[in-house]
Amino acid sequence: MINDMAQEPIKTPAKAVGPAEPAEDAVEKFLAEQKTLEAHRHDLIKELLRQKEAAMKEFDDKLARLGYDGDHAPKRTHHKNDADKKA
């Protein structure tokens, strides 16, 4: 008997075709922005490394002009000699 009664039609949710496309566009836009930011970041890192290398070369040139020879150990040290420790 219950099945003989008239029932309201069940509303099925409409497919969200319209809102899904802008969400995908927003995701694509975000990913593109992230990719450009990452590329810019890498360019900045490359530039920084180039500047660091140039500064180190300039410093080494100044040391060479002053007569610094990096092959020899420094003559003065705050460490005690091994001979002094044994005595």
Image (cartoon, helix red, strand yellow):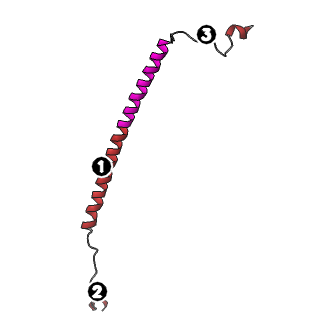
* Residue located beneath label 3 in the image: 75
Kind of residue at badge 2: Glu
Name which residue lies at 29% across and 74% down. Answer: 13
Task: Tell me the quarter of the picture where residue 14 sits.
Answer: bottom left
Q: Quadrant of the N terminus?
A: bottom left
Kind of residue at badge 1: Ala
Marked residue nearer the N-terminal end (3 or 1)? 1
Q: Is mark 2 on a helix, strand or loop?
A: loop
Magenta stretch encompasses residue 61: yes
Q: Which of marks 3 and 1 is in front?
A: 3
Magenta span: predominant SS is helix
Q: Which of 74 and 27 is in front in this view?
A: 74
Relative vertical location of residue 5 with respect to residue 67 in this rendering, above or below: below
Magenta stretch encompasses residue 42: no
**Where does the magenta region start and end?**
43-65
Relative vertical location of residue 77 with respect to residue 6 in this rendering, above or below: above
Disc number placed over residue 8 in the picture, else none = 2
Relative vertical location of residue 8 with respect to residue 13 in this rendering, above or below: below
* Residue located beneath label 1 in the image: 32
Kind of residue at badge 3: Lys
Task: Tell me the quarter of the picture where residue 57 sits.
Answer: top left
Residue 79, position as x, y percentages in the image: 67, 15
Marked residue nearer the N-terminal end (3 or 2)? 2
